[in-house]
Amino acid sequence: MNPSSTLSTPAPAHTSAALAPAFSGAANLILAVLSGRTLDAALADTLPSGALGSALRPAVMDLAYATLRSFGRGDFFLAQLMAKPVSDVQIRCLLLVALARLEARPEQAYVIVDQAVTAAAGIAAGNFKGLVNGVLRNFLRQQNDLLSRAKTNPVANFQHPAWWITRIKKDHPQHWQAILAAGNTHPPMTLRVNRRRTTSADFFTQLTKQGLAAQAVGELGWRLDKPVPVAQIPGFAQGLCSVQDAGAQRAAQLLEIAPGQRVLDACAAPGGKAAHLLELADISLLALDSDPARATLIADNFTRLGLHSERVAIRTGDAALPDTWWDGQPFERILADVPCTASGVVRRHPDAKWLRRPTDIDRFTRAQARIIDALWPTLAPGGKMLYATCSVFNAENDAQIAAFIGRHADAQRLPINAAPFEQLLPNADHDGFFYALLQKN
């Protein structure tokens, strides 16, 4: 779960000192991302639990996520406002944070500029306080003109890299602008009811008692009108529900499991889809993941939801190397939720837009092909494998499956709602996902 999906925007500050440390903390996170680190890794290193205090941590995260979502825009503004790039990269990151905040909170312009200058006093011996003040005040004076110019620059206007925009245009010519726009929004927060412990109706009643407004999404999903920390969700700690996007909830539904079946979740961490499978039917499940640390998250989720049993196993192993973990007994169902660019969930991981390169798509497609080719022999005749990604790039989705069918004469696509596959595009209800259901003849 993306931390930004559960945090509300911090309350407006009344003094420059109130959020100046948050500006500094967010600038450090942006600096880490620009240095090649993922935002999750930077958060783990920069914001250890309790290090910044409970009040400051949400503010830092809120600023960092907002800045990365609009990075293409802020970068464009700086290029227009400065004759040459600032020599101190941390100051550049601070300016990006402040520019994103100025656009989001224009009514707080005076306080934001003052906060940014106060934060600049703690960087490079305060040598850039005047520069920060000047750049931000120039932005406010030239804002209307800058906004007009930004509309003519695709990266600034759509807030995605140029190559990404080109790719989305090619893959989704009818919907490309909507996909890009969705990638710049705050993601919805959706809950999946654990029907082994409660009913959807009873859980909704608890949400209402807690004062949480929600809309039904599918049979077991509730999308909150306003995201909240999980601590505020009734029964979360007791395993009554999980946080899972409505698009991700489609996986367990599409796999068509039945009691008694032997099922493999080949890339299972952190365990959301595997848990959903166990909640739907009494199956024998192997939850596999290549990362030992992430595999522990599967166990934690199963414990909270009450899903451990002698028929449930969690193992660490490479899905592309079945000889290292498979006991030779075929599976009747396989969920192949393969690693991908995550282009369909970029609003939850805004750093991905700027860390990804065009060559990453080829790298992922090769890895995906290795995994599904290796998993296919472990599937029983008549069995079904659901191929899943959280991508909207065609090379990882329909093109990948078409190539797989060409390599395996005993594989056939099964229709999903009368279509050969299901491509969910990100919108207000769900993130972007792709599903293709394959059967072994």
Image (cartoon, grey):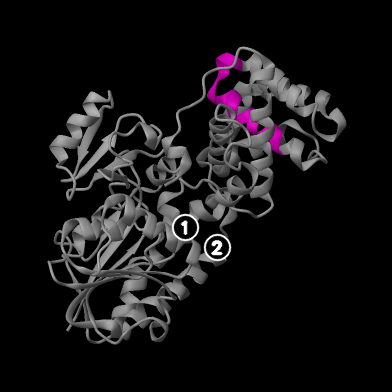
Query: Looking at the picture, how far across and down is residue 439, in whole percent?
Result: 19, 76
The mark nearer the N terminus, 1 or 2, is: 1
Mark 2 crowdedness (10 Å alpha carbons): few <14, some 14-19, many ≥20:
few
Disc number for residue 358: 2
At numbered mark 1, what does the secondary structure look like: helix, strand or loop? helix
Left or right, 311 with respect to 117, comes to left
Pointer 1 with pointer 2, Cβ within 8 A: yes
Instruction: Residue at 78%, 40% (x, y): give it.
Output: 85
Q: Residue at x 38, y 82 (%)?
A: 322
Report which residue position mark 1 lands on: 167
Q: Is residue 434 above or below residue 185?
A: below
Q: Position of residue 144 (x, y in %)?
A: 60, 22
Q: CA distance from mark 1 to mark 2?
A: 9 Å
Q: Residue at x 44, y 56 (%)?
A: 342
Q: Amino acid at mark 2?
A: Pro
Task: Residue at 24%, 30% (x, y): give it.
Answer: 207
206 drawn magenta = no
Instruction: State the extent of the magenta-drawn residues as a range.
Output: 93-108
Viewer-side residue, 208 vs 2: 208
